[in-house]
Structures are given as structure tokens and as C-alpha cells.
């Protein structure tokens, strides 16, 4: 069974919006884009590259897809597999795009994503895609959170758990602290919340 893995750069106060650049996602007047770059170091770069080099397909919201579609086809030398991976896109307005292979899912995406998870294939990696993640979490479709927690609070912006979460337990499968204070933690589902002491 395929897993859905949320791979996120996140601030201490839970913001995942616009980590990569000032113009990446300015929706809602967000003016702090590019907040991850002062915290880059060799440890963080190695972890990011490890995640990028795993077998994967992508599960993206429309906004993230459009941002990536404008960038990655022209920079495939830095991440060749992003262009060859199948991109499953949640969108009610987009049905086709030149960046292929891409599959567009309109309406309620919970059922199609659940079906994707049952099919053979690589894990489904979700980057950014804050709105899509709320839907996936509401329907208990996220199997892992691979977080890069940055030592910064942003005060405003799209948050990872904006819509809440379902009760679940997780276990840490990998962790590191970078020289710049980024805490990198991979959390995998570990069943229901334990209630015994």
C-alpha cells in the first residue's frame, strides 16, 4: 500500500506558507516568503536531497503545482525525478497542463486519494499544498509527517494543522538538529492514541 507523506518546512508556530521565495505564495498578503534560506546548512541539504532521491509520485494542490510547473521543467538537472514523477493534482479549475505526467482530480479528492493509496506504486509525497493537506488530514489519509522545524515564528500564514487533526499516535523514525537550529523529524503513524499509563 502506498503511503501519503507530508514533507514540510515549518515554522515554530506551524506556518508552511512561502518557504522558498518572496513571490512563492503571497496569498492573504503573506510577506515573509523565503524564510527558510538563512537556516540552510550541509546537514539540512543532505536530508532534503535524501528525500528528493527516494522513489515517489507527487500529490499537490493546484497552487503548489503551478508554482512548481513554472520552475522545475527548467531546472530538472537539480532534481530530475520531479519531472518524471506522476503529479496528482487537486484542482477544481485545472484539467490539463504541459507539465506531464499529470493527473487532475476535481471535487472531493478524499476518495481518489484513498484509491491511489490502495494501488501499487511509490509513496505519494506532498510538499506545501496547505489546503489539500487539511482535506487529507480530515479524512485520515496522511501516513507520515517529515518536518523541518525552523527556529522562527511568522505570526501569520497558512498553517499545517489549521483545520485541526484527528487523534493519532506517531513514532519518530529519523531525527537531526542542524547547525542553524532546524529540528528535522520524521514522524510515522503508530496507531491509535495510547490510553494506558
Image (cartoon, helix red, strand yellow):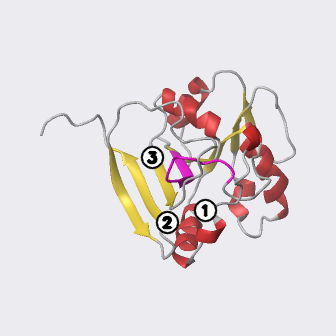
Q: Residues within 10 Å of mark 2 (few under 14, many from 20)?
A: many
- Looking at the rendering, the stretch of residues picked out in magenta corresponds to 5-18
Given this view, does label 1 or label 2 mark the residue nearer the observer?
A: 2
The residue nearer to you, when weighing 87 against 135, is 135
**In percent of the image, x 52 and y 68: which residue is there?**
47
Q: Is residue 38 above or below residue 190?
A: below
Give the CA separation, mark 1 to mark 2. 18 Å
**In the image, farthest residue toward the front:** 155
Q: Which residue is mark 3?
A: 144
**In percent of the image, x 47 and y 31: which residue is there?**
164
For the question of whether residue 102 can be seen, the reply is no
Instruction: Name which quarter of the figure residue 75 lies in.
Output: bottom right
Asked whether, in this view, residue 24 is left or right of residue 10, the answer is: right
Give the CA separation, mark 3 to mark 1. 16 Å
Q: Which residue is mark 2?
A: 182
**In percent of the image, x 64 and y 21: which residue is there?**
108
**In percent of the image, x 52 and y 46: which residue is there?**
14
Secondary structure under the numbered disc 3 in the rendered image: strand
Amino acid at each position: 500500500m502506498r503511503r501519503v507523506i507530508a514533507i514540510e518546512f515549518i515554522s515554530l508556530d506551524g506556518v508552511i506558507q512561502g518557504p522558498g521565495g518572496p513571490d512563492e505564495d503571497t496569498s492573504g498578503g503573506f510577506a515573509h516568503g523565503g524564510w527558510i534560506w538563512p537556516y540552510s546548512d550541509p546537514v539540512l541539504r543532505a536530508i532534503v536531497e535524501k528525500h528528493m532521491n527516494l522513489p515517489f509520485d507527487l500529490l499537490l494542490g493546484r497552487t503548489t503545482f503551478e508554482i512548481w510547473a513554472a520552475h522545475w521543467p527548467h531546472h530538472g538537472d537539480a532534481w530530475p525525478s520531479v519531472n518524471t514523477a506522476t503529479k496528482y493534482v487537486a484542482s477544481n479549475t485545472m484539467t490539463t497542463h504541459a507539465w506531464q505526467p499529470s493527473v487532475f482530480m476535481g471535487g472531493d479528492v478524499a476518495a481518489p486519494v484513498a484509491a491511489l493509496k490502495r494501488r501499487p506504486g511509490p509513496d505519494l509525497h506532498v510538499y506545501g499544498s496547505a489546503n489539500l493537506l487539511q482535506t487529507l488530514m480530515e479524512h485520515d489519509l496522511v501516513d507520515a509527517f517529515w518536518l523541518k522545524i525552523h527556529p522562527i515564528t511568522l505570526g501569520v500564514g497558512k498553517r499545517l494543522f489549521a483545520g485541526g487533526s484527528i487523534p493519532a499516535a506517531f513514532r519518530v523514525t529519523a531525527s537531526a538538529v542542524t547547525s542553524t537550529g532546524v529540528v528535522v523529524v520524521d514522524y510515522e503513524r503508530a496507531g491509535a492514541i495510547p490510553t494506558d499509563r
